[in-house]
């Protein structure tokens, strides 16, 4: 029996074109031995939930630098749940003001990361979350 | 409800979960696969291969759109990308080019890492195909890694292998030398909006002539006459060349038509049945080899096996002598 690889979907929801962070994180997770499905820019919450389902991922990672996280994150969580993927852990990175963090955590976001976040820390948290 | 029952009823989450079990070779997956096997054998499998950047993913996107527009068949896409040989991780990015397909319940895209396989597809791709086939996906498109050198495994798996070339990828001769044309059932020159299409087409045509029977010229009654190649041979198929612009959806009617013609040819020549049989036989024999090996090793003391291995490592006896010894008790 082979070991089960951690599968992660890295997505950029909304109209935000900042994709450096998403790519940095995707590569870091790959280098940590994970299989990362990268969807590219301008994904709707529906597209992200659909991809998460087809790919049967353990983790969905959202990269949002546009400020639209409070609209996008709950919608994506809701769709994952509707599809029966409650067990999927959702991480967010980008520009997330401190005051939004408690509410995001409450909704069920597992980890939140801002500019300069260490990829080692992200890798450790992802591994921990899917245990 | 069992996973297989849900899958046969069209449950997509159940399908996705089984794909994971099968990909990871989990025991739960084995029994589901066995239950689904009687429902397989209906799909047409299309392999899409060619060097990175030729536009395979973009073309697969358009091809799936075209099938969805013109038929009511469900389409599955298996997109294979390479795993890092150092970390075992992978970034699977083919979905980036397939965003047009989202929102259509009749399309299912699954990304796969090659996990060390070198033939362009992953070791478990064939089993993943069986799951989709049983789940009622009548068109299954497999996009290979596209390493460009020896993507032969996809040709063994697919009914119709589409080889994608593009102008301006440098040395046309290189692609042709690599022997990838030998596996082509349909040749696509994508990026036909780019300069250099004529050169690529000329290079392809001349290589096809080398590889396939063409008009033979011989002397007859003192005159030189040309005679057609032996087209009466039912197994004879010359890969058509189709020009496409995947980013604009151009040439897709022609591509779908070429694939349909090849499918009809497979039916008429009996090659579809022959290919299916050969594939299933080899699948069974590979499993048999593994099972026999396991059973054999169970009956041999580990110590004895280890000692024998040491003798081989120290060049005392050859591997072939060691096998004879294991089977007969002496190296003769
Ligand atoms: C580079 C940059 C750009 C580049 C983007 C190039 C590209 N292809 O990515 C360009 C010049 C194009 C650009 C344009 C704009 N930008 Co700009 N940009 C930046 C800048 C300076 C750096 C972003 C960056 O690439 N950082 C490097 C990466 C590696 O870091 P990161 O993305 O933060 O990622 C890290 C973490 O956040 C986290 N992370 C990120 N994603 C994920 C995902 C997961 C799953 C996880 C676990 C972690 C994680 O881990 C990463 C590693 O540490 C930021 C300011 C800043 N300091 O952040 C502004 C900034 C993001 N931009 C901003 C703005 C306003 C814009 C524009 C609207 C400007 C304009 N008026 O035109 C446009 C919009 C472009 C668009 N289409 O969306 C604002 C956003 C304000 C806000 N949200 O409230 C910022 C914050 C600048 C500011 N202080 O005003 N920008
Ligand atoms: N000009 C042009 N570009 C194309 C065409 N098809 C694909 N591309 C571009 O070629 C690049 C690689 O395409 P992709 O589908 O990812 O290729 P793959 O690596 O073979 O899967 C992308 O930037 C596409 O937009 C085409 O027909 N014409
Ligand atoms: Mg591709």
Image: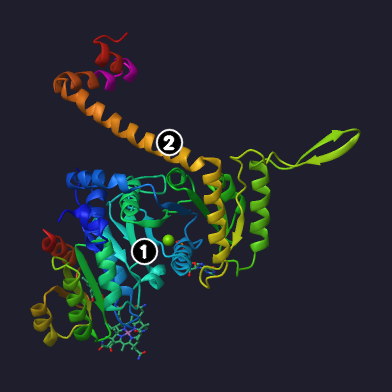
For label 2, the SS is: helix
Residue A52 horizontal/vertical position (percent) = 25, 67
Q: Nearer the viewer, residue B196 or B43?
A: B43
Q: Kindly indicate the quadrant of the structure image that contains residue B258.
A: bottom right
Q: Residue furthest right?
A: B222
Please give the residue where the numbered disc 2 appears in the rendered image: B278
* Within-10-Å neighbours for mark 2: few <14, some 14–19, many 20+: few
Residue B132 horizontal/vertical position (percent) = 33, 54
**Residue in the picture at 18% in, 73% down:** A82
Mark 1 CB within 8 Å of ligand 3:
yes
Q: CA distance from mark 2 to mark 1?
A: 33 Å
For label 1, the SS is: loop
Mark 2 CB within 8 Å of ligand 3:
no
Ligand 3 is located in which of the four quadrants? bottom left
- The quadrant in which the C terminus of chain A is found is bottom left
Q: Chain letter of disc 1? A: B
Residue B205 horizontal/vertical position (percent) = 67, 51
Callout 2 touching callout 1 (CB < 8 Å): no
Residue A61 horizontal/vertical position (percent) = 23, 70
Q: Nearer the viewer, residue B146 or A85?
A: A85
In magenta, the rendered stretch is B311-321
């Amino acid at each position: 029996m082979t070991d089960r690889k951690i599968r992660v979907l890295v997505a950029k929801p909304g109209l935000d074109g900042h994709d450096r962070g998403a790519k940095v994180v995707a590569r870091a997770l790959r280098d940590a031995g994970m299989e990362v499905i990268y969807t590219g820019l301008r994904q709707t919450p529906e597209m992200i939930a659909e991809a998460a389902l087809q790919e049967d991922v353990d983790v969905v990672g959202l990269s949002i630098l546009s400020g639209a996280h409070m609209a996008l994150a709950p919608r994506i969580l809701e769709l994952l749940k509707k599809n029966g993927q409650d067990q999927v852990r959702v991480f967010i990175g980008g520009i997330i003001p401190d005051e939004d963090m408690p509410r995001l955590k409450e909704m069920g976001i597992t980890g939140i990361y801002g500019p300069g976040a260490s990829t080692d820390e992200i890798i450790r948290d992802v591994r921990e979350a899917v245990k | 409800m069992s996973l297989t029952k849900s899958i046969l009823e069209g449950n997509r989450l159940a399908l996705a979960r089984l794909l994971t079990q099968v990909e990871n070779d989990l025991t739960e997956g084995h029994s589901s696969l066995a239950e689904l096997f009687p429902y397989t054998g209906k799909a047409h499998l299309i392999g899409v291969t060619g060097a990175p950047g030729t536009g395979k993913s973009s073309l697969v996107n358009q091809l799936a759109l075209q099938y969805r527009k013109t038929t009511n068949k469900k389409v599955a896409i298996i997109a294979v990308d390479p795993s890092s040989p150092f970390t075992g991780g992978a970034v699977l990015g083919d979905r980036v080019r397939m965003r047009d397909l989202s929102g259509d319940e009749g399309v299912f895209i699954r990304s796969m890492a090659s996990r060390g396989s070198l033939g362009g597809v992953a070791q478990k791709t064939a089993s993943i195909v069986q799951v989709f086939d049983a789940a009622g996906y009548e068109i299954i498109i497999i996009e290979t890694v596209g390493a460009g050198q020896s993507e032969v495994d996809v040709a063994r798996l697919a009914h119709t292998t589409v080889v994608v070339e593009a102008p301006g990828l440098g040395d046309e001769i290189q692609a042709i030398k690599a022997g990838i044309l030998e596996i082509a059932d349909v040749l696509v020159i994508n990026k036909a909006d780019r300069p250099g299409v004529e050169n690529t087409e000329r290079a392809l045509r001349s290589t096809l002539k080398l590889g396939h029977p063409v008009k033979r010229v011989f002397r007859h009654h003192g005159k030189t006459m040309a005679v057609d190649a032996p087209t009466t041979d039912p197994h004879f198929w010359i890969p058509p060349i189709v020009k496409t612009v995947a980013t604009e959806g151009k040439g897709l009617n022609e591509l779908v038509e070429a694939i349909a013609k090849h499918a009809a040819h497979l039916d008429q020549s009996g090659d579809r049945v022959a290919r299916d049989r050969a594939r299933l036989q080899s699948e069974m024999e590979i499993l048999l080899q593994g099972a026999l090996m396991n059973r054999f090793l169970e009956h041999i003391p580990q110590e004895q096996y280890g000692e024998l291995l040491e003798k081989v490592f120290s060049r005392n006896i050859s591997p072939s002598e060691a096998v004879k010894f294991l089977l007969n008790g002496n190296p003769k």
